[in-house]
Amino acid sequence: MKTLRRWSLKHARGMRGLYGLFERMAPRLAPVAEKIGVQRLEAVVLPIERAAKRAFFDCQMCGQCGLSVTGMACPTGCAKGMRNGPCGGVRLDGQCEVRPERRCTWVDATEGDARILPGHTSTWTRRAAPRDYRLTGRSTWIPMIAPPKAMPVPAAASATQAPRVQDDPVDNPFATLCRERSRFIVTVEISPPDSADPRALLDRAAVFRGLTDAINITDGAGANCHMSSAAASALLHAAGYTPVSQVSCRDRNRIALQGDVLGAAALGIRNVLCLTGDDVSKGDHAGAKPVFDLDSVNLLHTLKGMSERGEYASGRKLQHAPRLFLGATANPFVPPYAERIANLERKVDAGAQFIQTQFCFDIERLEQFMHAVRARGLHRRAAIIVGVGVLSTAKALRWMADHVPGVNVPLSVTERIGAAADQRLEGKRFCIETIQRIRGIEGVAGVHLMGYRNEDVLAQIIVEAGLRTPARDVEAVS
């Protein structure tokens, strides 16, 4: 089976041609379906379809086939169920984060794309809708032969109603700054505490008062359990900070995701960063069941619908629409590199208005990424905020590179820091140098500082890099 799978990728262009021919010829079998009945025809066709697709494409029979637009690689082969491009955790060798023995499905898809349309980065430009689990195991060939009849929609049900919009009592300077780009943006990341005492969070946030434009609150980062992102964000908001609540698809289905974001909005949370989420097997509850009902692109689309159309993903209307400012992540530093741009564009199309990247230790790779971003004009549609950070030693950097999905630390970086007499100081110097170089790249709107339980050093970097003056010299708060 693996041999056939590699063969089909190698001959993706020819396979795509055959698939297209079948799509055009299938309607000619409609009289057969009408004569013997669609259900009887499916009983004959389905075993053949399942065997052929599984052998050539490792198809999981989701009933919503996307092979013809994903380089002839089945998206449901992805361990996280990604339907709109790769996650940020792909390994440097192109292997899957969750199943290291397998190649990333989207690395395969990118390879197939390159063979189908040489010179193009992706044959897939539109968003793939969330998976409909009612269709699992059903044939996708039968609807080509005998398309289902459209059900008439009552006039009253088809009419669209604008959501009820109220004046928003919550000031959101971060959204204004991302839109206007009046200064270089600075955001930081804090992991919520393992405590029910809010002081544990507020004391760490106090280090950044006056130094940042927003503070990200992670959502079970690394698949480890902490205080919920929505609750921690609400605590920061009540204390006068501007939070960005991270929302991961790993732990909740589309019902819970919408409910949590709606509840957070009622508590004053406006900025939401949409993430797919890390693999549970690397966290402190390795036996937990991963959900991944949506990917980040479909989560963005869903929340945009709540905010702009005032309706749930089901189409049911909200009484009052939440005011949301949506963001997403990007990882230019791991393969498949060409697909990263197409994936970013799908996120922006789905509603992302700001983008925060993974740790940047490779400026050259970032410059290549930003060149492609500018070519598509994506930097004008969303604020690109580049992730930077620091760890105390070269050993810690190497551990992160080996154990944190999606982080690429070049050997030259660990060698430089490892050779220093004061590794902590050298790491800080490297981070400041990286920030200065990033500021010179056209299209970059800001930096996002990360460093687990390293708030004091990150605050020093912000000041020493000339990004902000100390809090005592300014009156603004985050």
Image (spheres, rainbow, N blue to C red):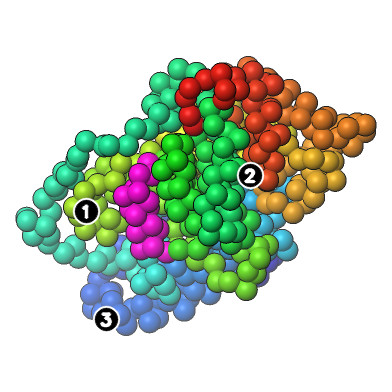
- Residue marked by disc 3: 36
The CA distance from mark 3 to mark 2 is 46 Å
Give the number of the disc on residue 336. 2
Q: Is residue 288 left or right of residue 383?
A: right
Q: Nearer the viewer, mark 1 or mark 2?
A: 1
Q: Is residue 156 above or below residue 39?
A: above
N-terminal label among 1 and 2: 1
> What residue sits 44% from the left and 52% below the top?
230
Q: Is residue 91 above or below residue 347?
A: below
How many residues crowd mark 1 within 10 Å: few (<14), some (14–19), many (20+)? some
Q: Amino acid at mark 2?
A: Pro
Q: Secondary structure at mark 3?
A: helix
Q: Nearer the viewer, mark 3 or mark 2?
A: 2
- Residue marked by disc 1: 318
> What residue sits 58% from the left and 71% below the top?
288
**Is 62 covered by the magenta stretch?**
no
How many residues crowd mark 2 within 10 Å: few (<14), some (14–19), many (20+)? many
N-terminal label among 3 and 2: 3
Span colored in magenta: 253-270
Q: Magenta: predominant secondary structure element?
A: helix
Closest to the observer, 407 or 141: 407
Closest to the observer, 115 or 315: 315
